[in-house]
Image (spheres, helix red, strand yellow):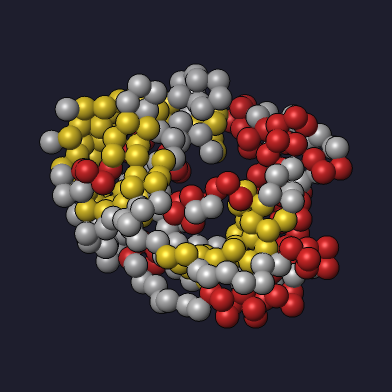
Amino acid sequence: MFYQGVLTKMETEFSSPIQYYLVFENDFINMNQLLNKSITMQFVKYQCLHCGLDKPIYRQGFDRQCFYEVPQAADWVMRPELSKAHLGIEERDLEFEKRTQLQPHIVYLANSSNVKVGVTRKNQVPTRWIDQGAHEAIEIVEVPNRYLAGVTEVALKEHVSDKTNWRKMLKNDIEDENLVEWRERLKGFIPDEAKDYFIESNTETNLEFPVAKYPEKPKSLNIVKELNYSGKLVGVKGQYLIFEDQTVFNVRANEGIVVKISIN
C-alpha cells in the first residue's frame, strides 16, 4: 500500500494519546496506526504550497518568490509584535491580515524541552502546543488582537525562554514544572496595555504523545538529499516522526515536498 502527496503539517486530534493525521489531497494516513510498522518514504518533487510549481522550497512550504509575496509568510507571522492590521496598515494583504490578526490571541507557557513563552490564535489551542511537542501548557493572557499578544511575548521573553530545544524535546529529556507558579511569577512583567487581559485562574493542560521509544541521539532526516528512507516508526511527537534507528523527520519543516510513502 502506498500514498503520495505534498507534505503539510500533520493534522492532530487532542486525545490521549494525541492522534496524528498526514493529509494529502485525496487521502490521509492516521500515523498512530503505523506505529511499529516499517515504512518507506521517497522524495518525488517540490510543490510550492502557493503556486503549485515544482520549484525548490525556500521556507514555510513556499518557493523563494512566493515566500516574499504571500501574506502567510510576512514578518508579522513569526514576529507578532510587528502586526499592524489594528491600525489599518497593510503589509501584503490587508483583508487577510485583518482576518488573521484581529481575532483573540493567547499568550501561553509551554513545557516541551523547557518552559517557554509563545503566541497563538485562540482557535489554535491546544493545536499549537501539540505541534511544539509540549507535555504541559497553560494560557496566561487572552488579548483581542495579534499585536497585543506580540508585545506581551516580547516583554515576557526577557524573563523566560521563547525557544524549544528540539533534540531535548524528542529525547523526552524533560521535567514537570508548576506552570501556575510560572504564570504568577511572570504576571508583573506583562506590559501595561495587556495587564487587563491576564487570566487570573486556570489550570495547565497535559498532553500525551504516541511514542513507544524515544531516541537517545536523534538524527534529522533530509529526504531531499537522501531521496529514499526506510525505517520502523516508533513514535510521533510535535511534528516529528520518530524511527527505531533514532532517525527523526520533521514534517512541518518539509512542507511543500511531494513524497511517496509505502507501508511495508
In this picture, is 219 found above or below 190?
above
Q: Is residue 88 visible?
A: yes
Number of disc labels:
0
Where is residue 81? Give x, y as percent.
75, 53
Where is residue 244? Give x, y as percent.
19, 54
Where is residue 122? Give x, y as percent.
61, 50
- Front position in the image: 230 or 175: 175
Q: Is residue 250 visible?
A: no
Please state if 261 lies on the left or on the right of 173 as rendered. Answer: left
In this picture, is 169 found above or below 91?
below
Please state if 205 lies on the left or on the right of 74 as rendered. Answer: left
Where is residue 45? Give x, y as percent.
38, 25
Q: Quadrant of the C terminus?
A: top left
- Front position in the image: 57 or 189: 189
Residue lying at the far left of the rendered structure:
264
Please state if 169 lies on the left or on the right of 42 as rendered. Answer: right
In this picture, is 186 found above or below 229?
below
Residue lying at the far front of the rendered structure:
201
Please state if 256 lies on the left or on the right of 258 as rendered. Answer: right
Quadrant position of residue 212 = bottom left
Quadrant position of residue 86 = top right
Q: Residue drawn 31% across and 56% down?
A: 17
Quadrant position of residue 44 = top left
- Front position in the image: 256 or 81: 81
Q: Residue drawn 53% across and 74% down?
A: 179
- Front position in the image: 44 or 6: 6
Q: Residue drawn 40% across and 51% down?
A: 14
Q: Quadrant of the N terminus?
A: top left
Q: Residue drawn 63% across and 37% down?
A: 73
